Structure formats: C-alpha cells, structure tokens
Image: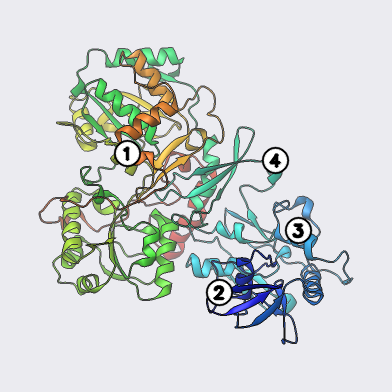
Amino acid sequence: MPKLTIDGLEVEVPAGTSVLQAAEELGIEIPRFCYHPRLPVAANCRMCLVEIEKVPKPVASCAQPVGEGMVVKTNSPAALQARKNVMELLLINHPLDCPICDQGGECDLQDQAVAYGKDKGRYIEEKRAVTEKYLGPLIKTAMTRCIHCTRCVRFLTEIAGVPELGMVNRGEHAEITTYVERALTSELSGNIVDLCPVGALTSKPYAFTARPWELKKTESIDVLDAVGSNIRIDTRGNQVMRVLPRLHEDVNEEWLGDKSRAAIDGLAKRRLDTPYVRRDGQLRPATWAEAFAAIEAGLSGLKGAEIAAIAGDLADAESMFALKLLMQALGSPNLDCRQDGAALDPKVSASWRFNTGIAGIEQADALLIVGSNPRIEAPVLNARIRKRVLKGGFKVATVGVKTDLTYAAQHLGDGVEAFQAVVDGENPFFDVLKTAERPMIVLGMGALARADGARILGAARHLAEKAGLVKDGWNGFNVLHTAAARVGGLEIGFVPGKGGLDTRGILKAAAAGKVKAVWLLGADQLPTNPLDSAFVIYQGHHGDVGAQVADVILPGAAYTEKDGTYVNTEGRVQRAQRAVFPPGEAREDWKILRAASEVLGHVLPFDSLDALRDALAAAVPAFATPDAAAPGAWGDFGEAGALDAALGPLGSAVSNYYMTDPISRASPTMAACTLEIIEAGNARTGTHG
C-alpha cells in the first residue's frame, strides 16, 4: 500500500484511493460539491483542489489517485487561493436569494462560501437565468442556482437506474434537464434533493413551510414497506414537516423511497381522533367509556372460538403482543398477522426471513426472483440488487410478470410452469444457481399469497436444498415482505393457535356466522363483505377500509406518534421513536388494549411500555437485542404438490407503489404521484392498471 504525506502527516492507504479519501482518513477536511462517496467521480466542480509537490498546478483531489511518496498540501496559500477562485466562478451566476431558498441553513454552498470564499466578487456582467424544469410532484426546481455538480444525474443513472436527467448544451448554456419535460419515474427520485449541494432541487411538498433551525429532529424507523429504513422525522409543534433518510449501512445505506419520504401529509388527513360506536346503522362519536362498554356488550356471552383478531401491516410489535395476550385470555385461538393470506410457516423462521440480510446481497453471485417486483415493493433493496449487478459476475433471473427492474434480468416466464422447470432442473438457470458460490432466491408475496402459496413455498424450499442455496455460512433463501408488521407478528406468534383459524378461515367463518366478533388491529387490506354480520372492533389511525365496516372504532396512533418496535424483512429488530403526539382522543395502541382488558375482566400483566417490552423480550428473546439480524433456523416447511397454473401469472403483491397503506392512500402527494407518474405512464405506453 502506498504511503503519502498530507499536511505533514503520513498515511498508508490502499492503492487506488484518492487523495481526498486519504485526507479524510487523517481527519483533514477538503471542501467539495460534486464528489460523493457513493457516486462515480465526476471531478467537475474543482472545489477540492490541493497542491501536490512536483505538480505544476493545483489538482482535483477527488480524482487523483495516491502515489508512493506523494506530498500533498491541502491548506497551502496556492490551494486556498485556487479554492477562492473556484468559489468566485461558481457564484458568478448564482442568485442572491438565500432568504427565500429552502436550502438556506443547510446549504453546502453557503457553508463553503463562508469558509473558503472571497469577501467580494469581480464579475459585473449580467447574470444568466435558467428556466425551471418540471420533475414531478416531489421535486421543486430553481435551476438558476444549479452549479452543474451532476450529483442528481449520476444518482438517477447509477444508483436508481432510471437515467432521466442529463446535461444539454455547453459552457454558459449548459442545463440539467429531463430532455422531455415530464415527471421523474424513479421511486427513489427524492434522494436527489438530499444530494443537491445548493438550492437547485428542493422538496416540492415541503416548499416554504419551515426552516431547519425551527425543527425538532427525532430518529425513527420507516414502516411504509418492510425494509425498515432508518429515518429522521423533523417536526414543528405537533406537525410532521418532513422525513429524511438516516445512515444505516446494513439496511438502507443513506437512501429512502419516495413514498416513505413524501406520504407524510397523509398523517393529517382522514384521521380517527375520537372513538366511534355504530348506533342505528351509523357510526357516531362516543367517549372512551362508551366505546369500551360497547365492546363489553358485543363480546358478552361469546365463546373463545367465536372471537378472532387480525393484525394489519403497520402494527407495532408491542400492540400485537398485547392483543395476542388478550385473545388468549378470552380463550380465542383465532388470530393472524397475515391479512393477505400469505402461506408462511410460523414454525420455521427461515421460511419467512430475508436470510442473507439486505447487505448480504452484495456477496451473492446469482439470484432468482419469484413473484416479486422489488422495484416497487422495496425500492431501497432493489437499489442494492442493482449495485451488485453493476459490479459484475451476478446473474439475475425472474419468474413473474415481466417488468423493468432497472437492471438486466433474464425473464424465465410468467407462470408457475417456469418456476417448476427451474425446481426440476429442466431450466438452464438451475445450473447457474447450483454452480454459484453464493446463490439466492427472493420469494415475493405475489407468489405466497396465492391459493397454491404453500406449494410454491415448498417448491422453493426444495429448490434451495437441491441447488445448494443453504450451506455453511450462507443461507440464500429469502422472502421479501411488503408489510412492516409481518415479520414481527410471526416472531411473536400472532398466528392461529391450536385449532385456530387463519385470515381466510376467519373471514369464511364470519360470513357463516361461526365467528361473531373480529378485532381488527389496523387491518385495512381485507375484503370486508364477509364481516358484515360480525361484531367488528377496528383499532387504527385512519378512516380506511377496516374502519368503514366497524361497529366500534378505537382511534390509535400512527408510527410517528408512538414508541414502537418493528422487525424488518431480514428479521432486524428496530425501535421507532415518538416524534409528535396522537391527535384528539387517539392513544397509543398498547394503552388502548391495556384499558380494554380491564373492562373485559382480563387485565394484561403490564402498565407501562417498559414492562410490556420486558414481557415481550421474555417471551421472544429476539426482541431483547435490537438492530441484530441473523438467518433463521432451517427446517421442513411448505407443502408438496402440483402448482396451479390456472391461477394465472405470478404478479407483484403491489399494484400501485404510491398507495399501499392507509397513510399513503390518504396522502394528496401520493395521489398526485399516482396521477402524474403511474397513470400518465400508462397513457404513454397504452397499458392499463
């Protein structure tokens, strides 16, 4: 490894390391605009100029590889003067609109102009102006501010895989544009707002609403998909103003999906902020005492087998655990967290985890995707797959409806026949998996939620064992969930007890009058017709599908309004923190269940969140070790038997990325994205959906 000296300090770094990276190893700061550690090097802002001995002019440190014996000066008079000159040139056309710029207060250009710029400029000619560009409902542009760092272009091209931005013209006439003016179609497009070092790209929903120094910042977890992206929630008063990604190398790196970022305006729409009780066929506002009295009356005289509970996709682990204990106290074995009916075996943890881990994708060398579209089910995870594809030596194949995943993938077929051919070794991709050192399969809810889902799961297990996907130090069997609550519910055991009914069984029994009361914990993805004759208790935060069929509504708290534990698709236990308080009479879900248990005569054995978490960790030890993920224990799972081709092609469980849950369905921004991106795209291509 070459040794070099930077500002009198000697450092030894791997060959190929840039001077800028070597300086960071020593804690020496070199200013930059275009350089970003996760993007290809462009070296076009020239702000990172340094002086290198025996080199006649300043050098861009981001693009200069280190050399043996190199002597670098980052703060010499020549280097400082070069930076001042660069800053002066960058500011020639930059408008003086910091007071009205949303980037103000967290702007790299502001900070570096103060630290490295001159106190005056010499340019007296007229400034140029650039027309604004339309990039869709999420991104607001002020392209006169653009300094052509091309971070946005490189992100969309390399990381997101949707090359819809680029530079046209040259010199003073150069502009960043979409070529054809239309909304960006990447599900990760909002990240270019974070990457922009100036105010050229800002958040359109957040525009002119707050200043960064006004905001309280809370570290939390995103629950609008199953990735468990780490986020920061910025609030003012009791209002969520914006959500930004937080660094976690093993989960989301520093990226965030557009829905997770921009659906937050749905938190204030269609909210349930007071209890409701159905009287004379209509839901009417009630007090908590009246709501609990109605529940007591509705459950009175019912046997345990006549009561059921279903947990929704956004439920936290604490509330599911509390509801499970309450159902057990009532004698009911009928409970399920798989409201889509996915055929996941609760007895074998490897059958419902992303066993390689999200970061483990980067070690794999072959991938088969079955019944899933990671691009819309988990955009951040899909970006990790693309990252691995770009490194080379990674073959990807898909079984299911053909779609653009943003990377090259061999399409083996639409239906289960193509999957069965791989399992039987009749498709050449079986040999690809068998000869790979670290092969993996990703099984989606589009496959497992079918009527033959248990047989597909069994076939996938057979393939994993036959092709060597599970071996010492590697488990390549992965299930990609779409619900943040699913893995946590399976860990807790929120599944049918002995003789109990699953979701399909509960709905069928309710329609037949055998199940007479159903407790819906935020369950909004169900067909409600079978529940018409049952007594329905809905506990949730939005007036969505479940609330409309309810006889009693208990207003709960959204994920930004409570401390809760969630388990992502790889089995990683993570804690969300309360950023604001629930509106009106709404309360945290575990508190509602604790209060209801008193009225029902089965008092739950905890009266604080800490006590509840202690009980949860005692029952399920995995909850005692947050932020740890490991492959599940392998075993025998799934069913044998022929796959049902008559059920049609293997599609994704998600049809509209922007509307998958009560929060995003209530969001005006997500409605605009649906209209301007999905429906406009369908109109251009002549497709329907």
- Spatial CA distance of label 2 from label 4 is 42 Å
Categorize mark 1 by other alpha carbons within 10 Å: few (<14), some (14-19), many (20+): few
Q: Residue at x 13, y 67 (%)?
A: 424
Q: Is residue 534 left or right of residue 580?
A: left
Q: Earlier in the sequence, mark 3 or mark 4?
A: 3
Q: Amino acid at mark 4?
A: Glu
Q: Are marks 3 and 2 in contact (CB under 8 Å)?
A: no
Q: Are marks 2 and 1 in contact (CB under 8 Å)?
A: no
- Spatial CA distance of label 3 from label 4 is 18 Å
Between disc 4 and disc 1, the foreground one is 1
- Disc number placed over residue 214 in the picture, else none: 4
Q: Position of residue 400 (x, y in %)?
A: 28, 61
- Spatial CA distance of label 3 from label 2 is 32 Å
- Spatial CA distance of label 4 from label 1 is 40 Å
Q: Which residue is mark 1?
A: 621
**Residue 22 appears in the picture as rendered:** yes
Q: Which residue is mark 3?
A: 110
- Spatial CA distance of label 2 from label 1 is 42 Å
Q: Position of residue 226 (x, y in %)?
A: 39, 48
Q: Which residue is mark 2?
A: 13
Q: Amino acid at mark 2?
A: Val
Q: Quadrant of the C terminus?
A: bottom left
- Spatial CA distance of label 3 from label 1 is 49 Å
Q: Earlier in the sequence, mark 2 or mark 4?
A: 2
Q: Earlier in the sequence, mark 3 or mark 2?
A: 2
Q: Is residue 332 left or right of residue 228?
A: left
Between disc 2 and disc 1, the foreground one is 2
Q: Amino acid at mark 1?
A: Pro
Q: Are marks 4 and 1 in contact (CB under 8 Å)?
A: no
Q: Position of residue 533 (x, y in %)?
A: 25, 24
